[in-house]
Image (tube, helix red, strand yellow):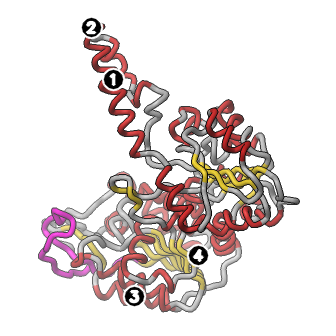
Amino acid sequence: MSMYNKKSVEDIPALGGKRVLVRCDFNVPQKDGVITSDKRIVEALPTIKYLAGKGARVILCSHLGKPHNIFTEGFGLNKKEKKALEALPEAEREAARTEMLEKAKKDGKKFTLRPVAERLAELLGKAVAFAADTVGEDAHAKADALQDGEILLIENVRFNAGEEKNAPEFAKALASLAEIYVNDAFGTAHRAHASTAGVADYLPAYCGYLIGKEIGIMGAALENPVRPFVAILGGAKVADKLNVINNLLTKVDTLIIGGGMAYTFLAAKGYEVGSSLLDSEKIEYCRDMMKKAEEKGVRLLLPVDSVVAATFPDPIDAAIDVETVPSDKIPSDKMGLDIGEKTRALFADAIKSAKTVVWNGPMGVFENPTLAKGTIAVAEALAECDGTTIVGGGDSAAACEQLGFADRITHISTGGGASLEFLEGLVLPGIACLQDK
């Protein structure tokens, strides 16, 4: 299937001297201009090293945060705010504009990729040039000056209004910097932006090692899994995973549902769920999904017991009084916040006996030590499973990292939203635009 079988950097002929535009995911956390985790930069290194090692002239681009086009669209104002600004007397309006311009400049420093260029140079052990714009004079001058094997990072693509709109003129301007395009940013592959999809209209497009790994492992799991195939879904709302559930029920042998979304399924079974999180509009949907599972011979596992409390912890990591009750006997004044001990054992048994496992979403409020036991149990079971284990980004990935199980998981996806859409069976724009093998 072409969705999963794309040409990679190793399929690019004669890289020496070619200018290659690489879309990376350098959306790294920072505090006061200092990068607090360089994980995403490290993940981009194999592709960058391969291209530079082959003599390519490497031009890197990425977004960072959500600057809302502060330099190009009224400093990030919405229509209502723009209207209010225009209604001010001229003197006040100019004063407000000056104030906003200063704020925009300050915010711009927060969203600059310059610290990424500096960290990348340290990791590579070689110079990385930085352009103060994306498609302006500085970017073109520095791209033109690159020698074989040299690397340039251009400024945050989201400083341009055309990026998130996938404006053809901006995509074309980006493409004019290079002769070849490589996408290695799986975390943004579900977005049809200029730097993730639009640019491929103007350049031959390939996938980097990171995207190749993502679609190779996850694609194989969804298209041709070694069975038994078990999927675990958690997180807060059923509404967030409607299409994921529907798609996975056509592929898996066992579907495990935990987290806040489980209580809507329990309500669909006619259980009292107290003040637990409930998508009341999705109860009928949950009944349909349970019926579909039965018709397809899929084992659908729900919590048989729940850890409950009178209120949600505030702050989220605060000490909290809990008790464990059967899932069909949740008191009317209590809410379910994690799976109970019997459920942890039930889920773990199903996971450990699997040959392919996909997990997306925590089993409870895992940020709270008292309510993290369900998520820990699932992470431990994945670590002990001898099959292919895949964690689909977001909170589940964070939990595995925090709990120290990451090195015992086959693959932890780098994209939360992208991996979720992948599990839905959707075509991701940033992958669909790449050349098929």
- The three-letter code of the residue at mark 2 reads Pro
Mark 3 belongs to which amino acid?
Leu
- The answer to the question of whether label 2 and label 3 lie on touching residues, with beta carbons closer than 8 A, is no
Looking at the image, which is closer to me, 61 or 294? 61
Under tag 3, what secondary structure? helix
Q: Which mark is residue 125?
A: none
Label 1 sits on residue: 81
Q: Earlier in the sequence, mark 1 or mark 4?
A: 1
At horizontal 72% and vertical 41% (from top left) the residue drawn is 177
- Asked if the residue under mark 3 is in contact with the one under mark 4, i.e. CB atoms within 8 Å, the reply is no
The residue at 21%/78% (across/down) is 370
Specify start and end residues of the magenta stretch as a single range. 302-326
Disc 3 marks which residue?
Answer: 346
User: Is residue 303 toward the left or the right of residue 389 in the image?
Assistant: left
Q: Nearer the viewer, mark 2 or mark 3?
A: 2
CA gap between label 3 and label 1 equals 53 Å
Disc 1 on helix, strand or loop?
helix
Q: Are marks 2 and 4 in contact (CB under 8 Å)?
A: no
* Above or below: residue 386 compared with residue 105: below
Q: Is residue 240 above or below residue 354?
A: above
Q: Mark 1 or mark 3, which is nearer the start of the sequence? A: 1
Kindly indicate whether the residue at mark 1 contacts the one at mark 3 (C-beta within 8 angstroms). Answer: no
- As for residue 310 lying within the magenta part, the answer is yes
Magenta stretch holds residue 431: no
Read off the residue under disc 4: 252
